[in-house]
Image (spheres, rainbow, N blue to C red):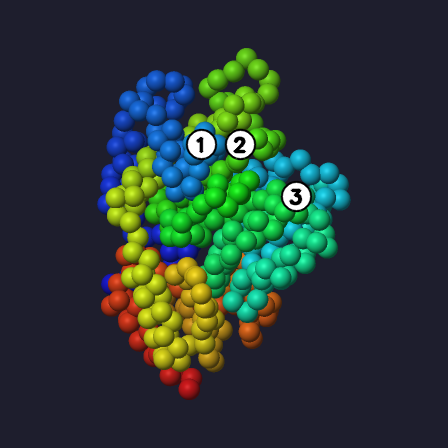
Amino acid sequence: MAIYMNNAATSWPKPPGVAQAMYESIIALPGAANRGGLSAFNLPGMVREALARVLGVTHPAQVVLTANATHALNLAIFGMALPRGAVVLTTMAEHNSVLRPLYTRSQKDGIRRVLVRTDYQGRVSLRDWRAALEAHHPAMVVFTHASNVTGAVNEVSELAALARGAGAVTLLDASQTAGWIPVKAEAWGMDMVAVTGHKYLLGPQGTGALYVAPGLALHPHLVGGTGIHSDEEEMPQEMPLHLEAGTPAEPALAGLLAALCWAEANPLDLKTENEKIVLTQTLLEEAGAEVVAVQGERMPVISFMVPGYSAEEAGDILSMADDIHLRTGLHCAPLVFAGLPGLAHKETIRISLSRFTTEAEIRELAQAVQAVAHVRV
């Protein structure tokens, strides 16, 4: 039987009720076609309210629904009015969904993208962050809540406070953490937070969101129909439609709402989940894997190598011979590898657990890794 350990890419299985909610949405009369009244309830509004609770915010209208986190991050990065020469501070742990938009703006608009190094676990140190803020005086900072390569969680509250003290607009990429680690956008003083629905929020692909703090003005990156003020040339000023154009994906939103409601009714037991992470790392090390060890707060994400193999070679064996679904490569976060011991210019095998991963599956993974490792001992 297949073992799925690629939840940092897309979660599986989905909770009970998600597929049924999507099916019922597809066969029902469309509610978004006229933005008006065919729907028996306000699905986008209900999703916003549920996401507001997840994100720790009090104004659901400030939660913009998107197709994914990449969409959300692009809205935030391209929507900020930044003059030529303005500095945007980010980190080497970032996903290409942050790095590439910032690079594009540097080429098109003349902004400066400054990278803060990460340590041997993929974290940003407060000392390096403070020094970069003092040296570069950024107009905006963008940083990830947790590395999608190592699982190391950043000290968001402290990073955000330092950035606010330096006068920078803050954007947090919580794609990897939302649904697993509490996000506290308002308590942290975040200006913007981007999330995706299909990872640890347990929803379907095609869902995401961007929280924009009240009073922060973004230029719409995508313009079109909204269902209101249709006689005007420009997008409505009212949030969230100021940043939402086009027909929403109702079936996907229905699935996301079902997932969010299920998660609220079934809170995650982080103590149990952290025990599973420790067990996985221990068994992999005992099996002969070279694990990127992470201390402190972390996600259920573990990167490792099997001695004598490239990541792709060992990953292919585990996938094809043992039917273990995992990920190999740079994981769309190529710069973080420079700080990982012995992994500069290399790649890793990444496994990522979920609340549905069993101890039996973890032990089967370790046995499979041990079998591969012993071939070339």
The residue type indicated by label 2 comes to Pro
What's the distance in space between the residues labelled 3 and 2, CA to CA?
17 Å
Per the rendering, the mark at residue 59 is 1
Q: Residue at the spot x=52%, y=67% of the render?
A: 121
**Image quarter of the C terminus:** bottom left
Quick check: marks 3 and 1 in contact, CB under 8 Å? no
Residue in front for this viewpoint, 241 or 223: 241
Q: Residue at x 32, y 19 (%)?
A: 38
Which of disc 1 and disc 2 is earlier in sequence? 1
- The answer to whether residue 53 is seen in the rendering is yes
Q: Are marks 2 and 1 in contact (CB under 8 Å)?
A: yes
- The residue that label 2 is drawn on is 214
Q: Is residue 61 left or right of residue 129?
A: left
Q: Quadrant of residue 336?
A: bottom right
Secondary structure at numbered mark 1: loop
In percent of width and height, residue 320 lies at 35, 67
Disc 1 marks a residue whose amino acid type is His
